[in-house]
Image: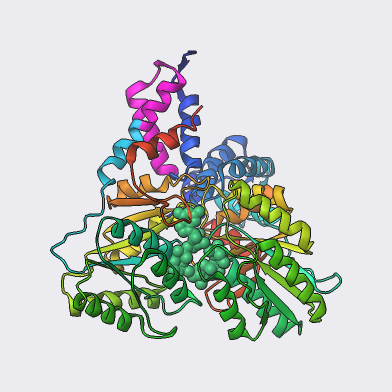
Amino acid sequence: FTKKRLDEAMLEELEDVLIQADFGVETATSVTDALRRDRFDRDVTTAEVRAVLAGEVARVLAPVARPLDIDPAHKPFVILMVGVNGSGKTTTIGKLAQKLSAEGKSVMLAAGDTFRAAAIEQLQVWGRRTGAPVVAKPTGADASGLAFEAVTRARAEGSDVLIIDTAGRLQNRDELMSELEKIVRVIKKVDPTAPHATLLTLDATTGQNALSQVEIFGRRAGVSGLVMTKLDGTARGGILVSIARKHGLPVHFIGVGEGVDDLEPFKADDFARAIAGRAE
Amino acid sequence: MFESLSDRLGKIFDGLRGRGALSEADVGEALREVRRALLEADVSLEVVRAFVEQVRERAIGAEVTRSVTPGQQVVKIVHDELVRVLGEAAVAIDLNAAPPVTIMMVGLQGSGKTTTTAKIAKRLSEKQGKKVLMASLDTRRPAAMDQLRILGEQISVATLPIVAGETPVEIARRAAREGRLGGFDVLILDTAGRTHIDEELMAETAEIKQLADPHEVLLVVDALTGQDAVNLARSFDTRVDITGIVMTRVDGDGRGGAALSMRAATGKPIKLIGVGERMDALEDFHPSRIADRILGM
Ligand SMILES: Nc1nc2c(ncn2[C@@H]2O[C@H](COP(=O)(O)OP(=O)(O)OP(=O)(O)O)[C@@H](O)[C@H]2O)c(=O)[nH]1
Ligand SMILES: Nc1nc2c(ncn2[C@@H]2O[C@H](COP(=O)(O)OP(=O)(O)OP(=O)(O)O)[C@@H](O)[C@H]2O)c(=O)[nH]1
Ligand SMILES: [K+]
Ligand SMILES: [Mg+2]
Ligand SMILES: [Mg+2]
């Protein structure tokens, strides 16, 4: 192995690798600062650099890599899925229904996107694929009314889990965020402890705006955990490191494809190694 | 959350009250802030590097007049250069071909292809009196074809009847035939979303393109895209030689640096922007406004 000195030039190259993975300048700098503190001016091999870099990233992510716990005390355990347009909410619901059904839980779905063309039909296909019944009303119906009906029905039928889809919305659209608050309020009328999990889907291709998505959806809808979708592309999803530093919200799953089984638990080590693998 | 470039440069040049030309040292420090501002706006690193060098050449020796501060002068140079790279004037969809003029929509999953297909169809039919046919070649995403059909009904534009079991290439062939026989002026092909590293689906896109021989191939991209913008734009361009870009979700509060990345990586014009979910939320691209946004102005 050829050893190289961990000097300023090398640290700058590493910072660039992190920036290209969507860490953002501030977080990239903080990670390379940690390397500078520990290893500066030592001779290192490429493998060592990657290992130290991965270790540093994993250190930030390890506390947020937490599974989604379905507390059986809640029947139904209500999951509300939120996020910006096209980020993968409906698909993630399908994958999650599959996973939970495979664990022996009875799952019901609610077609809470009453706005977008064929959003209801899309969820119904996922319902058929996974054997989960779907509560739906015609397009244009009130989303919170649908949510109310779904929680009521899931309770009456004794479902273990109810997953509620919502229409995609950009976090800077105040009236749409108010509508989301209303959905949460109405769910609480049936069960004051619900929703028991509010999951925000983040598209791995998204850059720095993901931070603002977490912040505003968190404030308005009470996000309890994150799912990062579309990690099967070439985007690295490094924004999760910034999000972990600033918000510390759990990351439950990653989406790695469009198929029903393409949902995996989020593993800090794997994620960190994939990013560090790009360092020369 | 982000400080605008003007504010930052204002601070740097605070001490520097002199008139005359900007020195290499003045410019050097300012460019570090320019780099940072562009990265925070999600401009891809590789594009940032090239861009900063272009600005350096323009800025060194630039005259600072009585009416502007050195900070304002650098911001102006950066802004002008951004507009130059983004493309000075709006480029419209080109319909100058034998009917049916075919437009093919491509892009990553969920970028906004189907919605944009319908928005463009509405615009061409209502504003330019064109007879438009839309066809969904998306045999993969659940209810994708229903989505386009419903949008067609909403905007009173014809969609190719759905036939179960056909491959995307077969649908493209049927759409072309229907476009000719039905006397349509424009045929818009909506395709399934795909990641640019999915070899099989990229090969499918190339096959569809070869068969349909589209006059326009529009890459639909999310304005919130991060550093991967250069890779994805270049991959699609290499594979299907795109003729233009449509940026969606410009109604969000993203800084839109991806516009610069993709324009610089492909040299292809950004033709339209999506500014909402509704069918009329489609606008012409104005480079200057995106430049302002990238700089946080
Ligand atoms: N490659 C890949 N595609 C995905 C993944 N998750 C979702 N998609 C695709 O992304 C597109 C959008 O997914 P949806 O589930 O419809 O997203 P959504 O957030 O429900 O969208 P709206 O309801 O319109 O806001 C679809 O084409 C999905 O197949 C993933 O992990 N990887
Ligand atoms: N806010 C906003 N939402 C948009 C815009 N364009 C599209 N959308 C929304 O983005 C989501 C995805 O749009 P689609 O048109 O289904 O995207 P697509 O590229 O066809 O998705 P796939 O076919 O799954 O790859 C939908 O919720 C649209 O309403 C836009 O300009 N602004
Ligand atoms: K997206
Ligand atoms: Mg959806
Ligand atoms: Mg589509």
Q: Indicate yes or no whether the magenta region holds residue A46.
A: yes
Examine the residues drawn in magenta and state their main secondary structure: helix
What residue span does the magenta drawing correspond to? Answer: A25-54
Where does residue A70 sit, x and y in percent of width and height? 21, 58
In the displayed structure, would residue B85 be above or below residue A14? below
User: Residue A276, relative to residue A147: is it above or below?
Assistant: above
Residue found 53% across the figure and 45% down from its top: A234
The residue at the far right in this view is B98
Q: How many numbered callouts?
A: 0
- The type of colouring in the image is rainbow
- The residue that appears at 44% across and 18% down in the rendered structure is A45
Along the line of sight, the residue nearer the viewer: B124 or A257 = A257
Question: In the shown orientation, is residue A154 left or right of residue A227?
Answer: left
Q: Quadrant of residue A56?
A: top left
Question: Is residue B33 inside the magenta stretch?
Answer: no
Q: Is residue A149 above or below residue A133?
A: below
The location of residue A271, given as percent across then percent down, is 39, 40
Residue A279 screen position, x and y as percent:
48, 30
Residue positioned most to the left:
A73
Q: Position of residue B153 (x, y in %)?
A: 60, 85
Determine whether, in the image, residue A228 is placed left or right of residue B149. left
The one nearer the camera, A134 or A149, is: A134
B137 and A116: which is toward the camera: B137
The reply, left or right, for residue B141 in relation to residue A63 is right
Q: Is residue A97 visible?
A: yes
Quadrant for the N terminus of chain B in the image = bottom left
The reply to whether residue A168 is visible in this rendering is no
